[in-house]
Image (spheres, grey):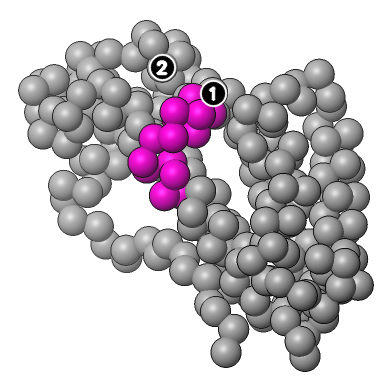
Amino acid sequence: MARRADSYRRPAAPPAEDRVEARLIAIAAEHIRRFGPDKVTVVAVAREAGMSHANVYRFFPSKAGLVEAVVVAWARSVELTLGDIANAPDPADDKLERFLTAWAKAQRDGLDRDSAIYGAYASFWEGRRDSIMAHRARLRAFLAAIVDEGLEPGPFRIRDEEKAVAFVADAMQRFIHPALVMETRDLTRAQVEARAALMARVVVRALVAGAV
């Protein structure tokens, strides 16, 4: 039986404390966008939230913890999008192509539209921060679930499932690894999306052809 990818589910009515925490994260995110993560202060976030900075520390152990919460919130938004694709009823080959292009698009969106937050995300990724490594593992699990779903009698003629998943991730590295994504600033969005879409098609065809 094919694995089903896990995905985040938003609670219908979050408790009051969760709403306060979400508001603090939203304010901190806006401050990061305006000033950069280094210049964000707990005092300024608390002031805008209408509370004492001591109250902010009830939710986050430090300024670094608050910045990390902002980055994790951005990462979870990506997981929600990709999880929906991974759990969709499409044929596995179509789904994989859509998943890979959406993954690449989400990274470029982060770079273009939330550059300060994405920069912090890249730093946390390079630093192998636990929260971001957990995020990375969930994305890899989505990918593995799609590959598993496409095994024979599905469209994929794969000799080794684990190697196939590694092949897909490796082939897409330029478009999904944050450090490499940041190196594509000199390319237009259209150029990056065209290249990512082409690579996604090549990857899918390789799995269908049994080349892995």
Residue 149 falls in image quadrant: bottom right
Q: Which mark is residue 37?
A: 2
Helix, strand or loop: magenta stretch = helix
* Residue 126 on the magenta segment: yes
Q: Is residue 14 visible?
A: yes
Which residue is found at the position 44% from the left and 35% from the top? 128
Which residue is found at the position 74% from the left and 37% from the top? 174
Task: Depth check: give the residue in front, 107 or 15.
Answer: 107
Q: Identify the residue position indicated by label 1 in the image.
A: 119
Give how far across and how far down residue 158 sits, in percent: 78, 75
The N terminus - image quarter: bottom right
Residue 61 falls in image quadrant: top left
Q: Amino acid at mark 2?
A: Pro
Other residues around mark 2 within 10 Å, as few (<14) / some (14–19) / many (≥20): many
* Residue 75 on the magenta segment: no
Give how far across and how far down residue 150 sits, in percent: 73, 79
Give how far across and how far down residue 85 sits, in percent: 63, 66
Q: Amino acid at mark 1?
A: Gly
Q: Which residues fall within the magenta stretch?
A: 121-135
Using the image, determine if residue 67 lies above or below residue 208.
above
> In the image, is 135 to the left or to the right of 93?
left
Q: Is residue 77 visible?
A: no
Label 2 element class: helix
Which residue is found at the position 77% from the left and 75% from the top? 159
Label 1 element class: helix
Task: Depth check: give the residue in front, 180 or 102.
Answer: 180
The C terminus - image quarter: bottom right
Which residue is found at the position 47% from the left and 65% from the top? 7
Q: Are marks 1 and 2 in contact (CB under 8 Å)?
A: yes
Give how far across and how far down residue 192 sits, in percent: 83, 36
Give the mark nearest the N terminus, 1 or 2: 2
Q: How many marks?
A: 2
